[in-house]
Image (spheres, rainbow, N blue to C red):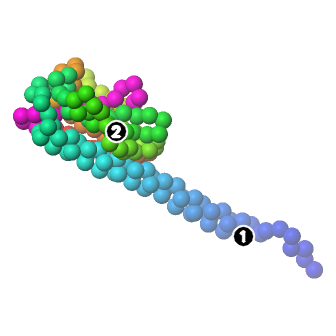
Amino acid sequence: MKDNRGFSLVELIICVAILSILLVFGFSQLGVVNSYRAREAVKKADTAINDCKVTTLSKSQATGLTLANGDVYLEFYKDANGYWIKLHEGTSSETIKQISKKRVKMTYKCDGPGSVETEVTETSPLRIGFNRTTGAFLAQADGTSVTSIKFYGGCPVSRKKLWQH
């Protein structure tokens, strides 16, 4: 009688093929999950920006053309748990909500020559405000205006642009 203690070469090839198919399917789903996180962050940020604009048009007392003169503005910032939005109304501030967890990256770009994408970090938050009379975006402290906000969800394919003007 034959001694059948091992696997044949054909059995090993079939097992490796099945495992590789499962691994490819599993890794491809990671991009979908991260893309979903970026899309959710875009929705939450878009809602907060629209709410801030409505609040500015209805409650703001300032009519300045820069964020330094605005009394109602949004601040996007990052901490150890992800990205957050804080609404500032006059001297008070209120954290609205967390817009994303750790695996999403948020960047913005301002107008002007040589402008590059800047990541929102703990030390470099993004502030967005609106003009009380026109509803237009207020200029940043350096005189530039934010032209786009992007969210990256793990891979470049899941990049979502919030707005661009």
Residue 5 as seen in the image, left or right of residue 150 = right
Mark 2 crowd level (few <14, some 14–19, many ≥20, 10 Å Cα):
few
Return the residue found at the far right: 1
Q: Give amino acid for label 1.
A: Glu
At which x and y percent is residue 93?
30, 33
Q: Is residue 122 magenta?
A: yes
Which part of the image, by quadrant, shows the N terminus?
bottom right
Cα–Cα span, label 2 and label 1 = 58 Å
Query: Which of labels 2 and 1 is toward the front?
Result: 2
Q: Which residue is mark 2?
A: 95
Q: Judging from the image, what secondary structure is the residue with disc 1 in?
A: helix
The relative height of residue 64 versus residue 54 in the rendered view (above or below) is: above
Above-or-below relation of 101 to 6: above
Is-magenta flag for residue 12?
Answer: no
Inspect the image, locate mark 2, and give the three-letter code of the amino acid beneath it: Thr
Mark 1 surroundings: few (<14), some (14-19) or many (≥20) residues within 10 A: few
Task: Give the magenta part as a residue range.
Answer: 121-135
Q: Residue 11, labelled with which disc?
A: 1
